[in-house]
Image: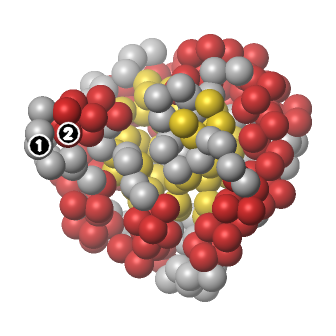
Amino acid sequence: MQHPIVQISLDLTDIREAIETAHLAIRAGVDWLEAGTPLILAEGLHGVRALRREFPEVPIIADLKTMDGGYLEAEMMARAGATHVVVMARAHEETIRCVVKAGRDCGVQVMGDNMIESDLVAAARRLEDLGCDIVIHHIGYDERRGIAARGGRMPSPLDQLRAVCEAVRVPVQAVGGLSLEQAIQCPAYGAPLVVLGAPLTIDADAFKTASGDLETSLRLICDAIHTQPVPAHLRVKP
């Protein structure tokens, strides 16, 4: 049995703050670092390179949300030091294939994101069939907030997480508005890769590090997640 993986999403717009937060997170027990989309928009390849220089042995996810130009985007991020790249299920099938090929050629893993698909379970299965190493089951930031602002029930990744996990053989992670308690529960649903980010550790409105004793909180969260076993068939590749 292997313990679940804890990933922190650095949804920040300043590389210095991202590196400070990353150091804190690694001290607290976080396993993987994610260069979140806001950081990539602000810093681009330079941000990924800076994280790789600072953390030479830590897996780094580049949350590109690739929709086109799949091979080039994945290749560029791999050369900058990313170990994982993200492609959207909404992208053309050929784009997903290109990202997967780049992943194989460049030695990086591909994470397929099912956000805004009409059938999230079917999209997860299609991402696996096309060669993605990990499925991201994702309810988007704007979608959640917009529905709630209009008085509707805010959708949660947990609504269909178990169904997604049962539909695929690759590891799954759930992303999108989870509370700390819900994030900690993800391995029990069959999702062994737990993402911590906005609004758990990042101020979701300002995209700045959350206030308070973040390191102590992260350590407690990591301990709660790491103590849960993961069956052999759901283990995440190093």
Left or right: 143 with respect to 206?
left
Query: Which image quadrant for residue 20?
Result: top right
**Which amino acid lies under the numbered mark 2 shown in the image of this protein?**
Ala
Query: Which image quadrant for residue 9?
Result: top right
**Residue displayed at 43% across by 72% down:** 185
Badge 1 density bin: few <14, some 14–19, many ≥20, Cα 10 Å:
few
- Which residue matches tag 2? 148
- Res. 80 visible in picture: no
The answer to whether residue 156 is above or below residue 217 is above
Position of residue 48 measured from the top left corner of the image (x, y, whole percent)? 72, 27
Query: Helix, strand or loop at disc 2?
Result: helix
**Residue displayed at 41% across by 78% down:** 188
Left or right: 119 with respect to 131?
left
| Disc 1 to disc 2: CB gap under 8 Å | yes
**Residue displayed at 30% across by 43% down:** 139
Badge 2 density bin: few <14, some 14–19, many ≥20, Cα 10 Å:
few
Quadrant of image for the N terminus: bottom right
**Which amino acid lies under the numbered mark 1 shown in the image of this protein?**
Gly
- Which residue matches tag 1? 152
Query: Which image quadrant for residue 216?
Result: bottom right
Question: How far apart are labels 1 and 2 at the CA level?
Answer: 5 Å
**Residue displayed at 68% across by 49% down:** 212
What is the residue that sits farthest to the front in this orientation? 212
Position of residue 221 measured from the top left corner of the image (x, y, whole percent)? 62, 67
In front here: 166 or 21? 21
Image disc number at residue 162? none
Position of residue 181 measured from the top left corner of the image (x, y, whole percent)? 45, 68
